[in-house]
Amino acid sequence: MDAFRQPPSAPRRTCPHAAPGGTAPGGKRALRIAAWAALAAVLALGFWGYTQPGMKLNWETLAALCGFGL
C-alpha cells in the first residue's frame, strides 16, 4: 500500500496551471471580476429600462431590423 503514496517532500498541486498561492496568473482575476461586474451592470440597466413604460420592446420593429417582414 505504501508503494503508491507520494513522498511527503513533493508538493501536490490540484491544477497544473494554478499559480502558487491560489491566485490567477497575470492579473486575470481582476479582469474576470471586472467583466462579471460589467455584465451585472448591463443586465441591471436592461432590467431597469424594461420596467420603464416608454422602454417596452416593440417586436415588430425588432423583426423589421432583422429583415423579417410581418
Image (tube, rainbow, N blue to C red):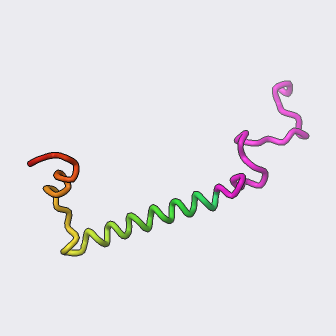
Question: In the image, 32: left or right of 11?
Answer: left
Secondary structure mostly taken by the magenta-highlighted segment of the chain: loop
In the rendered structure, the answer to whether residue 12 lies left or right of residue 47 reads: right
Tell me if residue 7 is in the magenta stretch. yes
**Residue 51, percent from left and from top:** 25, 72
Q: Which residue shows up at 78% across the image and 51% down it?
A: 20
Vertical order, 33 against 2 (above or below): below
Residue placed most toward the observer, 43 or 10: 43
Most extreme residue toward the right is 9
The correct choice, above or below, for 32 with respect to 11 in the image is below
**Residue at the extreme left:** 70
**Image: 65 above or below 44:** above
**Within the magenta stretch, is there residue 22?**
yes
Q: Residue at x 64, y 57 (%)?
A: 29
**In which quadrant will I find the N terminus?**
top right
The picture places residue 3, in percent across and down from the top left corner, at 85, 24
- Position of 26 with respect to 34 (left or right) is right
Residue at (20, 55) in percent of width and height: 62
Q: Nearer the viewer, residue 66 or 23?
A: 66
| Residue at the spot 22% in from the left edge and 49% down from the top edge | 66
Which image quadrant is residue 49 in?
Answer: bottom left
Provide residue 16's location: percent of width, then percent of height: 73, 39
The magenta stretch is 1-28
Q: Is residue 68 left or right of residue 43?
A: left
Total labels: the figure holds: 0
